[in-house]
Image (tube, rainbow, N blue to C red):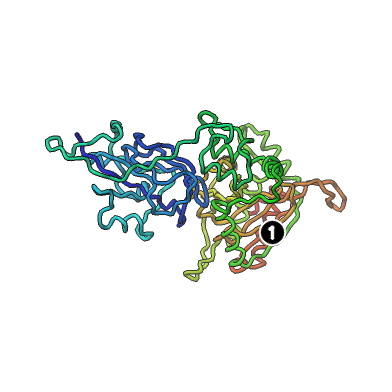
Amino acid sequence: MTATMIKEFRLPDLGEGLTESEILSWKVAVGDTVTLNQVIAEVETAKAVVELPSPFAGTVAALHEQPGTVVEVGKRIVSFEVDDAGSSNRGSTPAAGNGSAVETSANGSAPAGAADAVGSPAKREPNLVGYGAVVEHTGRPTRRARGQVQEAHPKAPVPEQPRSAPVAVPEPETASAERPRSTPPVRKLARDLGIDLEQVPGTGPGGLITREDVQGFTSTPETVSEAPAARGERETRTAIKGVRKFTAAAMVQSAFTAPHVTEFLTVDVTATMELLGRIKGNKAFEGYKLTPLTIAAKAMLVALRNNPTVNSRWDEANQEIVQFNYVNLGIAAATPRGLTVPNIKDADQLTLRELSTALTELTDTARAGKTSPSDLSGGTISITNIGVFGIDAGTPILNPGEAAIVALGAVRKAPWVVNDELAVRQVMSLSLSFDHRLVDGEQGSRFLADLGAILSDPAMVMTMI
């Protein structure tokens, strides 16, 4: 029989120096046979929900952390039993995206030097989200019965080697009249959110109430407020973690690091709204989602050509101003987990149809909580549409590392002077916040004026390209 060994998988750095993640759910159980790159867990970082691929093909020997637990990067989360001869089935290097893994010896301890390989931040490689380990061989290992002794050599059987006992995810409690069926982490989440589990319908096996059921229940504001009110509670407390915690820290850092200046400009966008209507009726754009945000984003990309200074970054460490010759356009998106700003890479190279597709995909992915860390990093300038909430103007805070952000106000009908006569027009207020270390008042004003000119008269694009 083939000899086996235990391989440990430690929580990898999922990008941007994130130090911890919360285990949301396990997609496997102890004793399950898994293939290389099979999704084994769903974790929530400070930026997004991420699916973890398996770095090995083998059998799940132990799950070391329970759902709902916040785990530090570098800590072991799962162990696999793999064939010694088939260990090459795993990815060849951590840099390939298989996270941090280490082999254990017969007594369950890691060999000398293993801690440095997987636990040291200096040597830990980031897991490339969306990519698993490099597949060098294919094939699915045969599942073995739990507890079965494996022979180290076909001619020289050896006694069973001791190893740490597998730690399984606890089974849901048996249903009873006193308590709805759920797991302890789900009950804790419900308590933190002030949710009465008796009011939450369970969609899991046998009516089990899952984390998704509780989070979906909180998406309806009245149910959140009614549950505490029914018990006479005067406060509802929610743990500050995940995306909300990261966003708060980033906004504080930005507000107290970059000297913000905000300028406002109200423009007549009647011509743009008429153009938008004509584009929607064009067969070439059939099936594409076009909104004022789409047109404004395209106009913003054109205005940047004449005003590249606002597409830059302050490099404090090197005492340099970095001007970007490309545009990774950040789109502020409100999600159930908080505000995120994923960005469209090389947005300045996209056509209007391509930009429309990218905007739709980016926002849909963000609202589903599936944005990858790579899409949340590397932005150069951002835009936010506060008009969808009926707001006219605001003072947006810069996304950290960027020099400017534009806020679009609501499009409203208002009295406007046209050719010295009063008329009813569609108007919009634009708000531009910029980092005054990088952008002078003149530079910021020229950019905002160019953006306003395009939205007032789309034909002005011809003067800027």
Q: Is residue 331 left or right of residue 135?
A: right
Q: Is residue 139 among the parts visible in the rendering?
A: no
Against 205, is 459 above or below?
below
* Residue furthest out toward the left: 155
- Nearest to the observer: residue 390 or residue 410: 390
Residue in view at x 60 percent, y 56 percent = 304
Residue 71 x %, y %: 45, 51
Residue in view at x 85 percent, y 49 percent = 415
Picture mark count: 1
Q: Secondary structure at mark 1?
A: loop
Tell me which amino acid carries mark 1: Thr
- Nearest to the observer: residue 302 or residue 261: 261
Against 10, is 170 above or below?
above
Residue 216: quarter of image: top right
- Nearest to the observer: residue 421 or residue 170: 170
Residue marked by disc 1:
395
Against 73, is 35 above or below?
above
Residue 115 x %, y %: 31, 57
Density class for disc 1 (Cα within 10 Å; few <14, some 14-19, many ≥20) is some
Residue 142 x %, y %: 28, 31
Q: Is residue 244 left or right of residue 142?
A: right
- Nearest to the observer: residue 271 or residue 175: 175
Residue in view at x 67 percent, y 66 percent = 442
Residue in view at x 41 percent, y 39 percent = 39
